[in-house]
Amino acid sequence: MTTVSRAVLAGSLAFGLAACSSSPAAAPATTVVPSGGAAPALAATTVRTIAGTGAAPFDKARELQAPPGWSVTVWARVPGARLLAWTPDKGLLVSRPKYGDIVQLTPAASGAAAPTQSTLVGGLTQPHGMAFAGNTLYVAESDQVDEFTWAGGAVAGRKVAVAGLPDAKSTELGGAYAHALKSVAVGKDGALYISVGSTGNISAEDRDARPERASILRVPPGGGAPATFARGVRNGTGLAVDPDGGVWTAVNNRDNIAYPHAGDDQGEVIQSYVNDHPIEPLARLTQGRDLGWPYCNPDPDLTPGEKDSPLSYTGRPLVRDFQTNPDGAKLDCAALPPIEQGMGAHSAPLGLSFTSSALPAGYGMGALVGIHGSWNRKPPRAPEVSFFAWRDGTLGPQQTLLTGFQAGDGSRWGRPVAAVQGPDGALYVSDDQAGAIYRVTAS
C-alpha cells in the first residue's frame, strides 16, 4: 500500500483505479476514510551503501520515502532474503527458502562495515519462519518444524518438533501447493503457533483436511499433536505475538472475487472491484476464530453496493462470497467478528513483528509488516514497510514507514518481505527482489 495522500497516513491511502476490465472508461478515484491521528509526512531519502553492498540494483542511485530525518542503508546483500530473527547474542538470522538455508549475519564492531555472513544451517526444505524461546530455535520448513539448541553462535541437537505438515510432496495433493511456506511463533506460555497456507485460491477442501490447511495450528507447551487454533486463514504468512501475549496474523487474501451486489455485473469478475476487494486482514486470533476464507470476505465498503463507496480498513465486517457462499449456507458471515485492521486488497503482507521499544517521531510501540506488493492489481499495489501503532491492547490503522520501491509504470527494483527491530533500536528490513537487508535509523 503506497502513501499518496499524506494526510491520511494513519488510516489508509487514496489511490486511483485502473480501467475496469468490462468497460473502457477509467474508474474514478476511491475515497479512503482515515481513522486515528495524522502521522508525519514522509520525505525523500537516498539509499546509502557501504563497502560490498553496491551491486545492482544499487549500482545507480535509489531513493525511498521515509519519516523525515530517517536514513536507509544497504547493510548486507543476501540473495533470496525472506524472514528475520535476532539471536540471543545479537546476530540476525535470515531465512532463504529458495536456497534451503538459514544465513547468520554477525554485526561488525564498526557500524560502518557490513556484517560477517555465514550459513547457520543448510540442506533444509524451504525454510521460512524462525522463532526463539530462550536458547531454543524453531525453524519452519515446508513439511515440518525443526528444533535446535542455540549456543555460542551455532546450533546443535536438531530434532523434529512438528512433523507431517502438508506441502507439495504430500501424496494426496499431487504436487500442487500454492502456499507451501510456513511461519512459526512462540506464545508467552511456550505453545508453538504454525501458519499453514491454503493449497490454492479457493480450495475449500483445505478446511476439512487433517491437519487443517488454511489455518493456524497450535502445539501445546512441551510438545504434542498440533491442533487447529484458527481457521479460514488463506495464507497467514505474517505471524507474531503481541506484548500482551495475543497471537496476530497478517493474511494474503483471495484473488479475483466476483462482484456480489445486485445488477448486471453481479457474479462477474470486474477489475475495478477486484482492485479493492477483499482487504488483507491483520487479525488477533483466539481459539476457534474463523477468518471466513473462502466463504466470507472482509469488506472495506462503507456503503456496500454503491459505486465508488468510501473505504475503511478498521473493524471491517465479513460478507458472503458470491462464488462460494451465495446464500450463506456454507458459513454465516455476519456472525463472524469484524477484522481488527486491514490493508488494501492484494498488498501481499508477509513478515509481521512487534517492536521491542518505541520508534521515534511519535510512532511509539507497534507492529511492523513487510508489504510485498500485488501481482494482479491494475495499477499494481506498491511494496512498502507498514507500521500499526500498539495502543490500549490493540493495533491502530496502517501507517507507511518506507516506500518508493515501485516506479510510476509499476516496475520495481525492490520488494520488502519483513522488518524487525534490532537490539540497537534500528529497523532491519529484508528485500528478496533486491537481495538486500536494509538498516533504517532515525537521527
Image (spheres, rainbow, N blue to C red):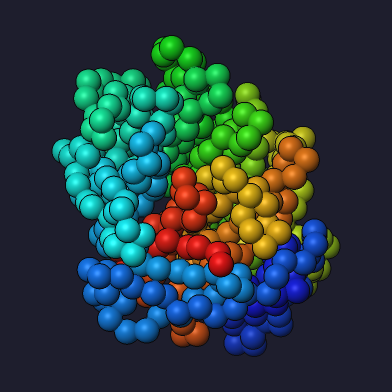
The C terminus sits in image quarter = bottom right
Apparent side of residue 265 relative to residue 205 in the rendered image (left or right):
right
Q: In the image, is residue 290 above or below residue 253?
A: above
Within the image, what quadrant is residue 137 found in?
top left
Instruction: Residue 329: give x, y in percent of width and height.
Output: 69, 36
Q: Does residue 277 appear in this view?
A: no
Q: In the image, is residue 379 above or below residue 309?
A: below
Residue at 29%, 49% in the rendered image:
105
Q: Residue furthest right?
A: 303
Instruction: Residue 276: give x, y in percent of width and height.
Output: 64, 65
Q: Does residue 119 appear in this view?
A: yes
Instruction: Residue 229: give x, y in percent of width and height.
Output: 56, 25
Q: In the image, is residue 384 above or below residue 148?
A: below
Apparent side of residue 152 relative to residue 209 in the rendered image (left or right):
left
Q: In the image, is residue 66 above or below residue 24?
A: above
Q: Residue furthest left?
A: 123
Instruction: Residue 233: give x, y in percent of width and height.
Output: 54, 40
Residue at 43%, 12% in the rendered image:
222
Nearer to the camera, 362 or 311: 362
